[in-house]
Amino acid sequence: MSPSNWLVSVPTNAYKEGYNMKFETNWKPDRQSGIPLYRQIAEYMRDKIIGGEWPPGSRIPTERSIAQAFEVNRSTVVQAFAELTAEGMIEGKSGSGTLVTHAIENRDIPKLPDWESYVKTGTHKPNHRTIQDINHAEFLPNIIRLGTGEPSPDLFPQTLGPILQELPAQMKHFGYTEPRGLYELREQISRHMGRYGVKVSPDSVLIVSGGLQALQLIALGLLKNGSTVLAESPSYLQSLQVFQSAGMSLTALPMDADGVDMATLEQYARSGRGTFLYTIPSFHNPTGIVMSEQRRQEIYKLGMQYKLPIIEDDAYRDLWLDEPSPPPIKALDQNGLVLYIGSMSKSLSPGLRIGWVIGPEQVIHRLADVKMQSDYGASTLSQWTVMHFLKQGLYEEHLVSLRKELKIRRAYMLQLLEHHLRAKATWHIPTGGFYIWLRLNGDQAIPSLFEAALKEGVLLNPGYLYDKTDQNHLRLSYSYASLEQMEKGICLLAELIQVD
């Protein structure tokens, strides 16, 4: 296979996961209104049914999930259900839960599409239930986010404000940009990557809405159904459904202290059982491992030997705390073997949704075409913002202060772990990035630990999200929670962990 071809057809072992219904709402009953809580909840549900948000024949959320969302006793929800049942709006079905009836206010409504069956059979697989829980819980008030992989709002640069105020006078247009993204931004990214030894022209840079979209475009635009993705284990990629939803399978490769295990990688590459290799060489998510320079060279040489393309996800490169990581694998590439993914989500602001892909021009044009079919380009405002941030030298200034703050947070979390979890877990000191890969001693029911912590207002990232077989690890992050929250969260975690 030629590196510029990027297409192979091999058997797939994509796994199936059932649909998990999730109840999410920002509405809460008003405890000061004088109206009984159950009646407020019944009225909320009644509006959902009459308005068609819960159509006839659809299954409604469980009593337990509604009670949790509204922070009321389950008995309160039972009363609301009883009122709606008496009105003929809902009915319990054995084995099917509670359904909206087809007769409301004496009006016979014809049977409508079974939306639940559509939801279950969509081609894009649902997130793992734990990830759905995390995505919901991250926005609950007062939650302590010990696993969140993004910078705290306290770490956003203050200089973003003045840039946004100045932009209206500096932006040349507010319309769509060309398919590859704003040319001025691609120029700045070209210069930025030159600092790391990656020589690339703006023509071979594609602006994307974050690193995740880069992976989606690669799956949709370059790979065939049945492709096999080789990836480190554990890996951020294991927590995503983007490739499995496109009919591809993931093959896990073990890691050592220097990165992906070369013997296993060569075995798969030699046999042709890999379409491409996905790797996070700098401050790996979730382990924090930094791939050695020698291992990067070995991987590149192996890729060339077996014509195995490489996807290098370098989202954490700028977040070194002790010393910079070795140059990107892409810096070795003079043959178009490596697709490089960079992002501003971890270092500048996740809400800007700006990342980039670097690769052969023909690949970039293909991905740009797919992107235009999906969203017609990343936010023009965000692109101009990042362009000016880079052009004015503010990004490098921001990184200095960001590293200083992350060092403080890392040191404090390590201190808390040493004090509270020394007898219950082991860990390595990360040299950059956001994460501490915590290994619990002995046997511990990680799903139960996740649920127990969440009930106490502490949100964790279990290791099984990054390796389905992992029941020993937690991914802790020192980038989001405040020092006070870290202390409270780690103390609670120490109380909940029960190891032999």
Image: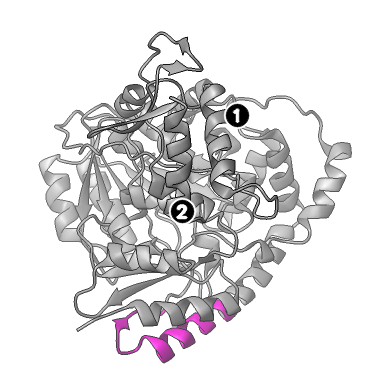
The residue range painted magenta reads 408-429
Dot in front, 1 or 2? 2
- The residue drawn where x is 48% and y is 50% is 76
Q: Residue furthest right?
A: 169
Residue linked to disc 1? 377
* Residue 249 or residue 483, whichever sits in front: 483
Mark yes or no: residue 254 visible. Answer: yes
Q: Position of residue 403 (x, y in %)?
A: 60, 72
- The residue drawn where x is 43% and y is 91% is 419
- Residue 453, quarter of the rendered image: bottom left
Q: Secondary structure at mark 1?
A: loop
Return the disc, 1 or 2, that comes first in the chain's sequence: 2
Q: Secondary structure at mark 2?
A: helix
> Considering only vertical position in the picture, is 381 above or below 462?
above
Q: Position of residue 116 (x, y in %)?
A: 35, 26
Q: Are marks 1 and 2 in contact (CB under 8 Å)?
A: no
- The residue drawn where x is 55% and y is 62% is 318
**Apparent side of residue 152 relative to residue 228 in the rendered image (left or right):** right
> Considering only vertical position in the picture, is 266 above or below 428?
above
Which amino acid type is shown beneath numbered disc 1?
Answer: Gly
Mark yes or no: residue 291 visible. Answer: no
Q: Position of residue 259 (x, y in %)?
A: 29, 64
Quadrant where the N terminus is found in the figure:
top left
- The residue drawn where x is 31% and y is 52% is 300
- Is 10 colored magenta in this rendering? no
**Apparent side of residue 185 relative to residue 486 in the rendered image (left or right):** right
